[in-house]
Each structure stands twice: as C-alpha cells, then as structure tokens.
Image: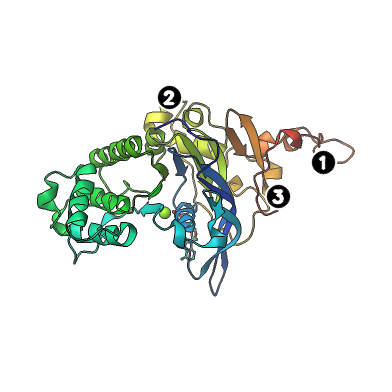
C-alpha cells in the first residue's frame, strides 16, 4: 500500500467497451469502463462473478480474442494507447497472475525451467545467469530452499507455493504493472494472507503498480489504495479504499459490504444481495443494478446513471445522486423537476 506518487497515471482505461459476439447474441461484457492506475499504486477492481473483471484484465494485456472484440475506448499505458499501437512493446512491462496457479504453470516442465524461459524471452538471460536469477526470484517470493526447489515440478509444490512460483514467473519479465486476477481465490485463508503480504512487500521493494481483482470486499480492503466497484460491465463506484469502506455511496457497494461479516458487523445488519449479475445484450439504457436494488425507483428502469462526484476522489453512478431524478414530479409536466443539476456530475463515458 502506498500513496499515489505521480500525477500522470501509468495506465488509464478510457471508455472501454468490449463485446462478445456469438451466433445467438452480442454480450456487452464491458460498457464504457474508466479507471486509472498511478505509479506504485494498488488499485482494486471488485465485483461479483460475471461482472467483467477478467475481461478488463485480459483487455489490458491484449488478450481479448474472437469472439470478443474491443469495440471502443482506449487503454493508455505510459501515454500510448495500446488498442492503437498494439501490445508488443508493452509485453514485458505488464504481467498477469491468474486465479488458478495450476493452470498457469506447465506440469511437464520444472518451475525453474518456466522462470528461465520467461527470463530468456523478456530479459535475454540464459545459462548460469538465468539459473541464478530464477533462484533469486523464487527467494524473493518466499520459497524456502530455492536452490533445491528450482528443479522441482509444479505438482511437487503446494497450492500456495505454486502461486508464489507463478508470481515469480510473472516477475521474471520485470514488469511495471502486475495485474492480479483473483490471485488468492483458490487458496485457503492463511495462504491467501501470505500471498497478500508478499504482494505488498514486492510493491514496497520495487515500486510495482498492481491492479488487484477480486470478488472479495474483505480482501480488497486489505490491499487496495483505491477501489473500483464493477457491476454488469460498468464501474458503478470508485473511491479511495478507506473512504469506500467507511462511506460507501452506491447501493451495490453497500450491499457488497454488508455481505461480508467483518465489515458488515460495523454497520447495521448482515444483508446479502439477492439475484445475479445480468449478462447485458445491449448498451445500457437503464441502471443495470435496478432489478436487485433496494433503493430503486421508477426512473432507474429507463435512465442510465452517470457518475456523480461525491468529493474526496469518490464517485458513484446512481440516480440517487442525480437530483433531477430524485426531486418530486412537477404537476404540469408529470416529469421530475430541476434539470440543472449536471454541473455536479462528472460524466463517466457510458455509450449513450
Ligand atoms: P468476472 O471475471 O467478473 O467473473 P468476466 O470478465 O469473466 O467476469 O465475464 C464478464 C462477462 O463477459 C460474462 O458474464 C460473460 O457473459 C462475458 N464473456 C466473457 N468471456 C466470454 C467469451 N469468451 N464468450 C462470450 N462471453 C464472454
Ligand atoms: Mg474473473
């Protein structure tokens, strides 16, 4: 965890929309997603399963393939839009750690072999230099007896050790940005805490920026400097982490927080949000959370909410904060009054 160190973001995702076309449907996996990551910062991306977190991660790495396509928007890394210039030059600068460590390591090669392969591709290291660096990397991620373990196969490692090895492999390309897509979800709680500590240490030592993706509000609260809350392909709230947890604005964020016992206990009662994340087939014309929202009112079914600045780096896309929709209906027109409230609203893309 760190303070933001420089003003210009290292990465900015701008109005990103990704669509998957299948024979039957067009799935709007991402619709107008905006967020950024500064140097040395850990940014959280949190939301339930199916909300578009992995599609966001894969987009940043340039891994969206048929039938998926980046329809619009930009992914600016150090000022260059990767959707325009391509990912080749950035390949060694951005690395990803996936949820399942077994899927990320090839069972037929030793762990050391796989790290050396990455060292060869990204840093041109071979032979003894590569072997020594592989051992150093394994040590840096806390693998005991690294010189002895470097020749072990992935199945000789425990789950937690395997995820450490995956992180070592990701670090082999000496990235500036590490995208962690649910890196601890497959691990038990104790091991999870160790991996989170490891990422924190690595960041402190190297100034690495991290995009930390999880469905777990408890986890994101321990790792992130700033958090983006994602729902059905959109960012619905963003805030500095402490602010998000002390004063959540969006009803979805409130629901997510209330559903974790440790944080919910501080609030009123323990709730869970009924229902599931929808799979959107078109660009948003309403609030996608409305069908599950305890605060929903009539306008939520036909107006797409924009981000409204809440001060202190927090914003939420919810009509509760767009005054024109919450003021009483005027008798003459039968429509909500007070139209001039958009000055306070920070527009957050969307495709309307
Ligand atoms: P999360 O990681 O938040 O659980 P994903 O980013 O994996 O969610 O997926 C978001 C949505 O994108 C899914 O609900 C799914 O409908 C759609 N999607 C992802 N990958 C594909 C694919 N290969 N083909 C069709 N739809 C996909
Ligand atoms: Mg995912």
Q: Locate residue 116: give its quadrant.
A: bottom left
What whole-number distance in Å separates the C-alpha atoms at marks 3 and 1? 13 Å
Q: Residue at x 55, y 44 (%)?
A: 35
For the residue pair 71 and 291, the one nearer the viewer reads as: 71
Residue 27 location (% of width, % of height): 55, 63
Q: Position of residue 111 (x, y in %)?
A: 19, 57
**In the shown orientation, is residue 221 left or right of residue 71?**
left
State the image coordinates of residue 222 (x, y, percent, origin top left). 37, 33
Local packing at callout 2 (Cα closer than 10 Å; few below 14, some 14-19, many 20+) is: few
**Mark found first going from the N terminus, 2 or 1:** 2
Q: Is residue 131 above or below residue 177?
A: below
Ligand 2 quadrant? bottom left
Picture layout, residue 208 above or below residue 15: above
Which one is in front, 27 or 199? 199
Q: CA distance from mark 2 to mark 1?
A: 39 Å
Mark sitting on residue 266: 2
Question: In 3D space, how far apart are the residues under numbered discs 2 and 3 (Cα atoms)?
Answer: 34 Å
The N terminus: image quadrant: top left
Is any atom of residue 256 visible in this view?
A: yes
Q: Is residue 232 visible in this depiction of the protein?
A: no
């Amino acid at each position: 965890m760190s303070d933001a160190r420089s003003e210009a973001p290292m990465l900015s995702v701008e109005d990103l929309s990704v669509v998957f076309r299948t024979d039957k449907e067009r799935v709007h996996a991402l619709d107008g997603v905006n967020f950024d990551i500064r140097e040395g910062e850990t940014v959280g991306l949190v939301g339930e399963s199916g909300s578009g977190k992995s599609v966001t991660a894969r987009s940043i790495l340039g891994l969206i393939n048929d039938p998926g396509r980046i329809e619009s928007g930009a992914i600016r890394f150090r000022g260059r839009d990767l959707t325009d210039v391509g990912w080749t030059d950035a390949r060694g600068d951005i690395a990803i750690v996936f949820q399942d460590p077994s899927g990320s390591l090839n069972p037929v090669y030793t762990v050391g072999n796989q790290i050396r392969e990455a060292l060869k591709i990204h840093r041109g290291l071979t032979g003894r230099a590569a072997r020594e660096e592989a051992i150093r990397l394994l040590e840096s991620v806390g693998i005991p007896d690294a010189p002895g373990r470097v020749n072990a196969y992935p199945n000789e490692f425990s789950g937690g050790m395997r995820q450490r090895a995956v992180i070592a492999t990701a670090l082999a390309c000496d990235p500036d940005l590490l995208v962690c897509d649910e890196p601890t979800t497959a691990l038990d709680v104790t091991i999870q805490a160790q991996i989170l500590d490891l990422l924190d240490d690595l960041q402190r030592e190297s100034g690495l920026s991290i995009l930390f993706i999880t469905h777990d509000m408890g986890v994101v609260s321990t790792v992130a400097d700033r958090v983006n809350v994602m729902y059905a392909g959109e960012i619905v709230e963003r805030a500095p982490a402490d602010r998000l947890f002390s004063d959540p604005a969006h009803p979805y964020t409130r629901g997510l927080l209330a559903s974790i016992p440790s944080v919910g206990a501080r609030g009123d009662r323990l709730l869970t949000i009924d229902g599931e994340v929808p799979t959107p087939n078109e660009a948003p014309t309403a609030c996608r959370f409305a069908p599950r929202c305890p605060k929903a009112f009539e306008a939520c079914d036909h107006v797409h909410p924009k981000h409204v600045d809440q001060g202190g780096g927090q914003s939420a896309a919810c009509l509760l904060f767009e005054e024109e929709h919450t003021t009483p209906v005027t008798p003459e027109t039968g429509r909500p009054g007070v139209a001039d409230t958009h000055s306070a609203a920070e527009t957050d893309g969307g495709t309307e």
